Structure formats: structure tokens, C-alpha cells
């Protein structure tokens, strides 16, 4: 009898037996754990699909770049028998001031939701026109100049858009006159006076989008001010706001970026640079779930 009790005690306190029991229990618990993980993955995938569907119906992520002043040049090559060709001189603003009043709303579908927005944009600044020299014999086509603004998703534009340049109001036309800088956007045809060296501009428009709102710092000095009733912004990207205020009524934030913070110049000819696609470009971006960053990708 004493030997039997001793054997029972050995079985109860055996470390090997305990480890085997724990392993068996762990295997039994893995099945429901994997089921929970599968449900989480499915919900995440469905949430992303709903966001994409709402973005497709409303408007997608928005990146605003510009305006840019474009002046065509007719170039006569020095090489004999070479035909003349046209290139475009692209000029960035000397100063660029962007103000945005952003209103958000939450769209629901089933158990999922996505944040969309509509913003009242006001953009102003000025261009300083330098001496234009292509390095070859050329003719400046002042009568064929135009302004362009890069907008990543034109579906978000609400109503017409006009730019006021030196007291002249110019209505926008769809699309871009050249693909040198932007892949999508709008164009404002204009006629420039050769003697003009400084042009002041302003424009205002409504733009809808979802997920994010970004700006490319096209100005030699770019200033951005954004206001919104959204009370939980997340500031991301290359630059934090120079100052910001966040409370229950929403937030207001300001950024300032100079041409020294970017990797493209004030002007160039042709398609040498595409600012909105360059790595290292720093601009404010508003991300909607947790928003606002300076675009650097």
C-alpha cells in the first residue's frame, strides 16, 4: 500500500507529464485562436474593400500641386536640316499660400465606415518671370502660355474653377495641355505680355475626396493653413505643423516649406522633373482616419 501511494505522488508531480498536458491543451486552444484571427483578417479585408468602394463613388485620395505657369518655346536646333520643335518652360510660384476649410462626414456600409471630406480651397501667390533662355535659338510663344494645377482625382471637383491672374479671370478647361509635370489636373489658357515680370494670382474651388488630402510645395515659399471640425488629427510625413491647435471643436494647423526643403528647382524646360512623384518632396498631407502629413513619397 505504501508503495502504491508513493507511485501516485510521483505521477502527480512529474514534470514530463505536466509538459505533455500543457502541450495538448495548447493544441486544443490553437483552433479557436486561429478562427478568431481568420475573422479579424476577413473584417480588415472587407473594411479596405468598403473604403475603396466609397472612394470610387465619392472621390479618392487628393493631391493638389500648383499652380504652375507654362510658357511654350519654339526651338530652332543649330544642327542643319533639323526641324524646329516645341518645348515648354515651367515656372513655379515665388510665393504660394494655401488655405483649406475641410468638412468631413462618415459614410456607413453594413458594419463598416469610411471618412470622406469636402474642402473649400483658396490658393494665392505670385510668379516672378525670369529671363528665359533655352540654350538654343528659340522663340517665346507668349500667346500660347497657360497655367496648370495638378489634381490627382478630377472627379472631386465641384463646380467650375477660375483663376484670377493680374485682374484677368480665366476659366479652367478639362485636362492638361502637356504631361511634363502632372498626370492629371486642369488647365487655364492665357496670353502673357512680354514686359510683365511679376504676376499675382488667386483662385478658389471646392474639392471632395477620401482617405487623404495632400499638397506639393511648388512655391519658393509655400504656406499651408488647414482648419476642420475633425477633432482627432494625426500629423504624419516629413514635416510637423509649425503650430497647431486641437480641441473638441476641431483643429487648425499651419505649415511652411521653402524651396530648400525640396529636390526640384524654381523653373526648368521639358519633363526633367515631376514634383508630385519625386521622393523627398515634402508637402502637407491630411490623412483621414488619422490625418495630416507632408507628402514625401
Image (cartoon, rainbow, N blue to C red):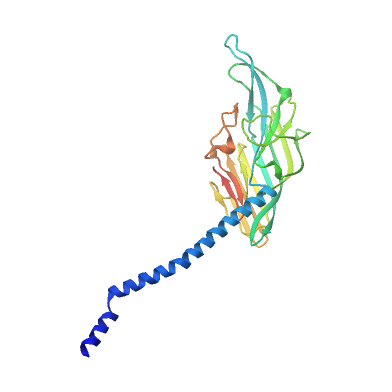
In the current view of this chain or complex, which residue is farthest to the bottom? 1
- Give whichever of 94, 228 is nearer the camera: 228
Q: In this view, does 3 lie above or below 215?
A: below
Tell me if residue 226 can be seen: no
Q: Where is residue 129 in the image (x, y as percent from the top left)?
A: 66, 28
In the current view of this chain or complex, which residue is farthest to the top? 80
**Residue at horizontal 57 percent and vertical 53 percent from the top:** 235
Q: Position of residue 84 (x, y in %)?
A: 64, 15
Total numbered badges shown on the rendered structure: 0
In the current view of this chain or complex, which residue is farthest to the left? 3
**Residue at horizontal 63 percent and vertical 29 percent from the top:** 90
Tell me if residue 246 can be seen: yes
Q: Quadrant of residue 232?
A: bottom right
Q: Where the N terminus falls, by quadrant? A: bottom left
- Give whichever of 130, 192 is nearer the camera: 192
**Residue at horizontal 27 percent and vertical 84 percent from the top:** 8
- Give whichever of 161, 34 is nearer the camera: 34
Q: In which quarter of the image is residue 76?
A: top right
- Give whichever of 42, 285 is nearer the camera: 42
Q: Where the C terminus falls, by quadrant? A: top right
Q: Position of residue 25 (x, y in %)?
A: 39, 72
Q: Position of residue 250 (x, y in %)?
A: 66, 58
Amino acid at each position: 500500500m505504501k508503495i502504491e501511494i508513493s507511485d501516485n505522488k510521483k505521477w502527480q508531480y512529474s514534470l514530463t507529464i505536466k509538459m505533455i498536458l500543457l502541450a495538448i491543451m495548447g493544441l486544443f486552444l490553437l483552433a479557436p485562436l486561429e478562427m478568431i484571427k481568420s475573422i479579424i483578417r476577413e473584417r480588415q479585408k472587407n473594411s479596405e474593400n468598403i473604403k475603396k468602394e466609397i472612394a470610387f463613388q465619392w472621390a479618392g485620395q487628393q493631391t493638389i500641386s500648383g499652380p504652375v505657369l507654362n510658357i511654350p518655346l519654339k526651338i530652332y536646333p543649330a544642327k542643319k536640316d533639323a526641324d524646329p520643335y516645341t518645348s515648354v518652360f515651367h515656372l513655379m510660384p515665388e510665393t504660394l499660400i494655401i488655405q483649406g476649410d475641410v468638412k468631413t462626414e462618415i459614410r456607413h456600409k453594413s458594419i463598416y465606415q469610411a471618412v470622406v471630406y469636402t474642402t473649400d480651397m483658396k490658393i494665392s501667390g505670385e510668379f516672378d518671370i525670369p529671363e528665359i533662355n533655352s540654350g538654343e535659338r528659340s522663340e517665346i510663344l507668349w500667346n500660347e502660355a497657360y497655367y496648370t494645377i495638378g489634381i490627382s482625382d478630377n472627379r472631386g471637383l465641384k463646380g467650375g474653377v477660375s483663376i484670377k491672374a493680374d485682374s484677368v479671370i480665366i476659366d479652367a478647361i478639362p485636362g492638361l495641355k502637356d504631361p511634363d509635370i502632372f498626370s492629371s489636373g486642369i488647365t487655364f489658357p492665357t496670353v502673357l505680355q512680354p514686359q510683365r515680370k511679376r504676376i499675382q494670382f488667386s483662385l478658389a474651388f471646392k474639392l471632395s475626396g477620401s482617405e487623404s488630402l495632400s499638397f506639393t510645395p511648388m512655391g519658393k515659399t509655400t504656406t499651408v493653413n488647414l482648419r476642420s471640425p475633425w477633432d482627432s488629427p494625426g500629423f504624419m510625413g516629413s514635416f510637423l505643423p509649425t503650430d497647431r491647435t486641437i480641441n473638441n471643436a476641431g483643429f487648425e494647423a499651419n505649415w511652411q516649406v521653402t524651396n530648400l526643403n525640396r529636390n526640384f528647382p524654381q523653373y526648368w524646360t521639358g519633363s526633367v522633373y515631376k514634383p508630385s512623384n519625386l521622393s523627398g518632396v515634402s508637402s502637407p498631407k491630411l490623412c483621414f482616419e488619422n490625418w495630416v502629413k507632408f507628402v514625401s513619397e
